[in-house]
Image (cartoon, grey):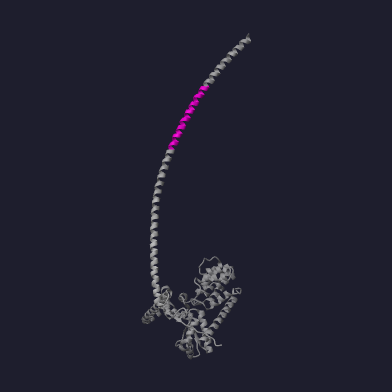
Amino acid sequence: MGAAKARGEAESKLGEIKVDTEKIVAEARKEAETKAKEIIIEARDEAQQLVKNADKENRKKQSDFDKLQNRLNQKEESLDKKLEQIEKKEEDIKDREKKISASEQEIEKKLQEQREKLQQISGLSAEEARAHLLGILDKDLKKEYANAIKDYGDKLKIEAKRRSQQIISMAIQRCAVDHVAESTVSVVPLSSDDMKGRIIGREGRNIRSFETLTGVDLVVDDTPEAVVISSFDPIRREIARRSLEKLVADGRIHPARIEEVIEKTRADLESDIVQEGERVAFETKMTDLHPELIKLLGRLKFRTSYGQNVLNHSIEVAHLAASMAADLDVSVPLARRGGLLHDIGKAVDFEVEGPHALIGADLAKRYRETKGIIHIIASHHMDIEQQTIEAILVQVADGISGSRPGARREDLESYITRLTKLEDLALEFEGVDRAFAIQAGREIRVMVKPDRIDDDEAILLARNIAKKIESDLSYPGQIKINVLRETRAIDYAK
């Protein structure tokens, strides 16, 4: 009985639990349905909002697209109009070209008719007639121009003669007489004054030939038993002095003999230059110098700087620099070699433009000197910065040798530079063969090629050189331009 009661209570409780469970499930289902409806409503609202936004964006993009389309349509219409205008202009241009071409053909036809008539009358072709007329016109104009210049020059000579003494005095003020005379003049003694006439020759042919071949000015004046050789180039002057002494001693003086002696003297002097260079190299214990450097050293014997012989100066600088290098315990051979070669550029500075220090450095580099020697040469006048003790010693030795009392005199460098520039300026002109500055720069003698310059053109050339000198050079007084045109005919009897 007790078990039945317990079973009954259990079943009663089980029924209550089922009812509660069903009630909870029903409530949960109801609540879930309610939330699902709310989610669906929210999703629907959000979707509608997105659709509205998308429609709004599409409408905006469509509006922009319509505006862009309208602008493109307008530009297309504008381009079409411009294209039509261009096509119309092209048609107009073609029409004009046709008209111009027709006119040109008509003009050419008429010109051809005129040419044919002219050729029939003259008997010459068009090219022949043109060349003939131009030749006549060019020759007449040159002759008239040359005559006008000659007439004007003759008038100026009257005034120039009156002012010549004043001009010469200005030149003397620019350069000391004793220094220029010592540096640019050599005196050749004669056995008698009768020899002066033989030196001059018939109508001056001997002296003219001598001056032309040597490039010096030979002064034959009232000086008893002596003639004077004047030239700013010491090698030219030495060649002239030796040649004249040989001619005087031999007694045979005529143009052919003069030319022969001068050529032989020039060759002998080249040999002497080499021997002098070898002597200096041996004296300074530098027998390994390049042969060309030895030759350049020999040339320095005939070169002066402010009245000081450059070769003696170079030897002195070499000894001074070596002595100081020994006291300072630096390279004695480097200092001695750099001192000897420091002015090597002066052997060719008449022929090459630029500072002699840099010219000398280029020569040393060309003939395989060491970088130390090249640096010493290039820096001894501070053209480049000095970087070694030996370079400074050479500069100091150079200053000592040049500044000691009596070593140098007045400024000759500017004088020689001016004469060199004077010759170089004349050589720039077409047809000029050789040019020599003489009379201490108061005259330049210009030899022209006779097959390229005729007599009338020689007058014009002299005038053009004078104008060039006036515009490019600074000089005291006046300079005479003497243009010489000579034709030689040579043959041999066999």
Q: Is residue 79 above or below residue 191?
A: above
- The image shows residue 246 at horizontal and vertical percentages of 53, 86
Q: Quadrant of the C terminus?
A: bottom right
For the question of whether residue 208 can be seen, the reply is: yes
Identify the residue at the far top of this view. 1
Q: Is residue 224 above or below residue 71?
A: below
Is 91 left or right of 206, judged from the image as shown? left
- What segment is highlighted magenta in the picture? 28-57
Q: Is residue 12 above or below residue 64?
A: above
Q: How many marks?
A: 0
Residue situated in front as seen by the camera: 6 or 432: 432
Whether residue 36 appears in magenta in the rendering, the answer is yes
- The image shows residue 344 at horizontal and vertical percentages of 54, 73
Residue situated in front as seen by the camera: 138 or 223: 138
Q: Quadrant of the N terminus?
A: top right
- The image shows residue 391 at horizontal and vertical percentages of 55, 68
Say which residue appears at 39% left-offset and 64% top-offset. 102
Residue situated in front as seen by the camera: 166 or 22: 22
